[in-house]
């Protein structure tokens, strides 16, 4: 009885070694990744700081205190983002998701509090955002890691 030979994932040509192809190609080089590691928190912080200052100003004139508030928010957001990004991969998937959820909930709750809403309303909105981010992050980490918490090689 004849059986079919298993198909090779890479077509073989006699005399030429097979080159494995990655499942997802990395289209950016290391330099681009290095720039993005610092540009993401800086640009994100600038957007967050401008947004917080604009909400805080409430269509009034731009003052020195408002600009200072925006820059302080920028520095705070960027520093927290860098800290969370550095610490999160060292944690198990549950704590990894909790850390990102806390970051998202706190930053959103602070922005929401600048609109003049009560502390209780800002807290509830931050908790809703945190719960949503936790669910999404946990699902992503759970489906992309093996049982020991190592990244899935697929």
Image: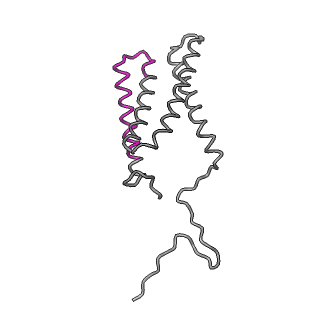
Q: x and y percent of residue 51 in the render?
A: 53, 23
- State left or right for residue 111 relative to residue 33: left
- Most prominent secondary structure in the magenta stretch? helix
Up the image or down, 138 lies above or below 49; here it is below
Q: x and y percent of residue 116 in the render?
A: 42, 15
- Residue located farthest toward the bottom when viewing the structure as drawn: 1
Q: Is residue 7 magenta?
A: no
Q: Is residue 126 magenta?
A: yes
Figure label count: 0
Up the image or down, 151 lies above or below 68; here it is below
Quarter occupied by the N terminus: bottom left
Q: x and y percent of residue 131 in the render?
A: 35, 35
Up the image or down, 23 lies above or below 37; here it is below
Q: Which one is nearer the viewer's eye here, 21 or 79?
A: 79
Please report the bounds of the magenta region as a residue range: 111-140
- State left or right for residue 95 relative to residue 54: left
Q: Which one is nearer the viewer's eye here, 80 or 27?
A: 80
Seen at 60% across and 40% down, the residue is 36
Seen at 51% across and 73% down, the residue is 8
Q: Which one is nearer the viewer's eye here, 17 or 125?
A: 17
Q: How does the figure colour the protein chain or chains?
A: one colour
Q: x and y percent of residue 67 in the render?
A: 59, 16
């Amino acid at each position: 009885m004849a059986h079919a030979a298993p198909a090779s994932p890479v077509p073989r040509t006699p005399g030429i070694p097979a080159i494995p192809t990655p499942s997802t190609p990395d289209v950016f080089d290391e330099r681009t990744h290095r720039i993005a590691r610092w540009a993401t928190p800086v640009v994100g912080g600038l957007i967050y700081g401008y947004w917080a200052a604009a909400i805080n100003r409430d269509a009034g004139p731009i003052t020195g205190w408002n600009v200072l508030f925006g820059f302080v928010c920028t520095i705070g957001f960027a520093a927290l983002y860098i800290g969370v990004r550095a610490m999160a991969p060292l944690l198990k998937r549950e704590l990894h998701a909790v850390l990102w959820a806390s970051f998202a909930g706190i930053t959103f709750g602070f922005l929401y509090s600048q609109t003049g809403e009560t502390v209780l309303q800002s807290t509830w909105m931050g908790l809703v955002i945190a719960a949503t981010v936790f669910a999404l992050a946990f699902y992503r980490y759970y489906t992309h890691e093996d049982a020991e918490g190592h990244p899935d090689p697929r």
